[in-house]
Amino acid sequence: MAEVAREGPQCPRTSMTAAYLDGELDTAACEEFDLHARACPDCSAALLDQRRLLCLLDTAFDETFEKGLKLPDGFTRQLKARAQNDLSGVRDARERRRALKICAALGAAAFALLGFAAFDVVTRPALRALGAASGVLGVAGRASAEAGSGATVVLRAVAGRIISGAESASVFWVLLLAAGVVLLLRLVSGYHRASARD
Amino acid sequence: MIAHAVSPTNAPLADTELVLRALAGREDGFEELVRRYQRPIVAYVYRMVGDYDSALDLAQEVFIKVYNSLGRYRPEFKFSTWIYRIAHNAAIDHLRRQGASRIEEMEVEGHEGTTFEKPLASKAPTPEQETERGERRAEIEEVVAQLSPAYRELIVLRHSHDLSYDEIAEVTSLPLGTVKNRIFRAREAMRELLVARGITGM
């Protein structure tokens, strides 16, 4: 029998045909729709189409697909083992809290034992190394301070000579002139670079 | 021979019994749950994501979550609904990671005619195609794979896993009214795709 897709506006109750055929309407709604469908061409046509489709689906959705699935060998055992060994979730919060407490206690005990055992091996040599390092740093610090104070004395003498000298003003003007020349040269070269780009 | 968890009367134990066994630390409880649900979950996720290897990985993720959340399972709900909900979340997260931004958007686009080519991977097991029934089944699978994920999921949960509308609403976190309406639209979308393929003998 030729089958065509329905077009145009339909009776809004055609959407009830699926639930009606699947026995999912309550008794009153079922009786009401039954009466309606007898008088409604849209709904009676929809019922016919859905019934035909259901016959087809019954044929297609038998157990063949499910039974035909080739599961890997040992899949059941694999699923079970993965689920039981998965650590992402312990069954309840109480068990999780207890596990956390035990882990924390074990961690603290391990830390204390390791600390005690490692005192001679790690802590003492580390303290000795720390003492030696502080001595070296002290010597270096003293040397740096002396070098710094020497440099300050020299700079002060040089600066005093320059500033107190008669020619200090001319030195200032020479430096200013040199800075102006450098600035002018940069501006000129920048202008030429911009021209070349254009 | 593999020993299955059974009651003293040799009847298979209910899922909730198996959960209780697993929670009590008995390995056979969880093992039987895995045995019972591994195929449905792989099949469901495979149909959702369209890639067999990803489906196997996601199934592992699902069972890890199930194992770690067994203590939060409430026996008044069906175990199958609960596990499908976990699988639904895993599949949707996977699809989002793959680039599909929002499941709602995917549905709208699909409804407007843009179908989502998510062909079943060639290395995955293919259904028997020698008989006419097998060919028809393969065609239907292709059409289901072309549906938008939002529609595909409802079709698969309803028709392949026999979930009720209430259960589907619980798995997908959709209101019941939306489920009713969307299943109709999903079937209509499917019907149109089948008609476009020339399958008219419905």
Image: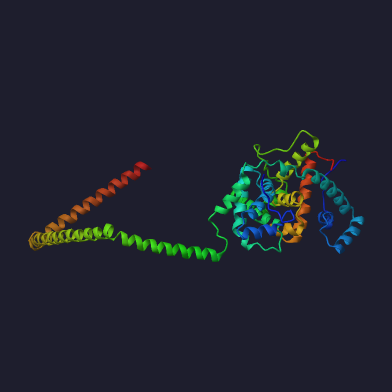
Q: Name the side, left or right, on which B53 lies relative to B129.
A: left
Check the image and name the residue furthest to the top.
B130
Instruction: Indicate the position of residue B26 as horizontal and vertical percent values.
Output: 62, 57
Is residue B98 in sight in this rendering? no
The picture quadrant where one finds residue B121 is top right
The picture quadrant where one finds residue A106 is bottom left
Instruction: Indicate the position of residue B68 as horizontal and vertical percent values.
Output: 59, 58
Instruction: Indicate the position of residue A90 as horizontal and vertical percent values.
Output: 55, 60
Q: Name the side, left or right, on which B67 lies relative to A169.
A: right
Colour scheme:
rainbow
**A91 or A166, which lies in front?**
A91
**B113 or B172, which lies in front?**
B172
Q: Looking at the image, how many numbered discs can be counted on the residues? A: 0
Residue at (75, 57) in percent of width and height: B179
Check the image and name the residue furthest to the front.
B8
Instruction: Indicate the position of residue B64 as horizontal and vertical percent values.
Output: 59, 53
Is residue B31 in sight in this rendering? yes
Residue at (61, 56) in percent of width and height: B67
Is residue A146 depicted above or below A61 in this figure?
below
Quadrant in the picture for the N terminus of chain B: top right
Quadrant in the picture for the C terminus of chain B: top right
